[in-house]
Image: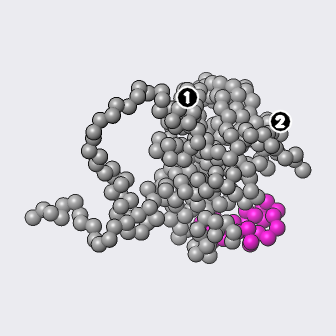
């Protein structure tokens, strides 16, 4: 039985280094994540985001530096770290042959938890999947699969979860579904470390944002703090035009239902 961890810091990374052959991927990475917050690790493809997550999840060993998760050193207390975390990778790790409920029951049994069926039903309700719980996952949309995948990571109530590019390849509606799910997790006290290459995703979700570039954290702060790095904005009158996202959500709604009454006209409907 591991001791309860009361520190306000859920994740602490200091001087982390990792190379693949002659390629130095991480060259002294430092950051901290407050308990119950959403921390976005932002960077382009190949920046080292997944490498950081794999080290924190004890799937990879760093060559230098230290890291603790939930108060446990990832190198010295790997078993305790694994009991404290859950990881959702870039692709939904769900069994398409099974139903959503069966997927959840399977994971609960693998974790030797009592009342696997009750746990599954509770998570289906929490993630608005009750009506689809009996269907095979092969029939699920991308957003539903990702919600089920995240639900599976919460079995056992891990205090820290890692989401590695959770909306990669999803359509706009599915991305919004995942965003709402992540916000609910943090509101419930779960610490979320989110890696993404989508700027709007980090802006929407994160309490703090760190940018990983060429193996180092080049900036780390709140959105307001990061915006202060640029010259102050000039106040000018500009007629705001709707963005493509505004148009999309107005037409289909953020839950996939029609957002406007009547039939939308096509862009060329006025042509003779």
Characterize the local packing of mark 2: few (<14), some (14-19) or many (20 or more) Cα atoms within 10 angstroms.
few
Residue 14 visible here:
yes
In the shown orientation, is residue 53 left or right of residue 226? right
Q: Quadrant of residue 66?
A: top right
Does the magenta run of residues contain 137?
A: no
Task: Give the residues in magenta.
Answer: 94-120
Q: Residue at x 55, y 26 (%)?
A: 218
Which one is in front, 50 or 40? 40
Location of mark 2 (residue)? 76
Q: Give coordinates of residue 98: x percent, y percent.
A: 64, 70
Total numbered labels: 2
Q: CA distance from mark 1 to mark 2?
A: 29 Å
Q: Residue at x 76, y 36 (%)?
A: 68
Q: Give coordinates of residue 244: x percent, y percent.
A: 33, 52
Location of mark 1 (residue)? 219
Q: Residue at x 41, y 64 (%)?
A: 253
């Amino acid at each position: 039985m591991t001791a309860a961890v009361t520190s306000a810091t859920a994740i602490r990374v200091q001087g982390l280094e990792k190379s693949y052959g002659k390629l130095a991927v991480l060259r002294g990475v430092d950051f901290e994540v407050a308990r119950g917050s959403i921390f976005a690790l932002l960077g382009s493809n190949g920046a080292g985001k997944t490498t950081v997550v794999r080290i924190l999840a004890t799937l990879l060993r760093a060559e230098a530096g230290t890291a603790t998760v939930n108060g446990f050193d990832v190198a010295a207390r790997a078993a305790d770290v694994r009991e404290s975390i859950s990881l959702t990778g870039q692709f939904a790790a769900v069994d398409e042959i099974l139903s959503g409920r069966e997927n959840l029951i399977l994971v609960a049994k693998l974790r030797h938890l009592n009342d696997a069926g009750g746990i599954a039903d509770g998570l289906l309700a929490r993630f608005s999947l009750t009506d689809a719980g009996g269907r095979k996952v092969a029939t699920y949309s991308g957003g539903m699969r990702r919600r089920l995948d995240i639900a599976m990571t919460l079995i056992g109530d891990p205090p820290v979860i890692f989401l590695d590019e959770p909306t990669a390849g999803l359509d706009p509606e599915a991305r919004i579904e995942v965003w709402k799910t992540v916000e609910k997790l943090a509101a419930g006290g779960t610490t979320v470390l989110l890696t993404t290459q989508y700027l709007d995703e980090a802006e929407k979700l994160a309490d703090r944002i760190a940018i990983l570039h060429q193996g180092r954290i080049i900036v780390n702060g709140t959105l307001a703090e990061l915006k202060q790095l640029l010259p102050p904005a000039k106040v000018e009158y500009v007629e705001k035009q709707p963005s493509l996202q505004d148009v999309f959500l107005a037409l289909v709604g953020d839950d996939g239902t029609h957002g406007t009454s009547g039939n939308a006209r096509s862009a060329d409907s006025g042509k003779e």
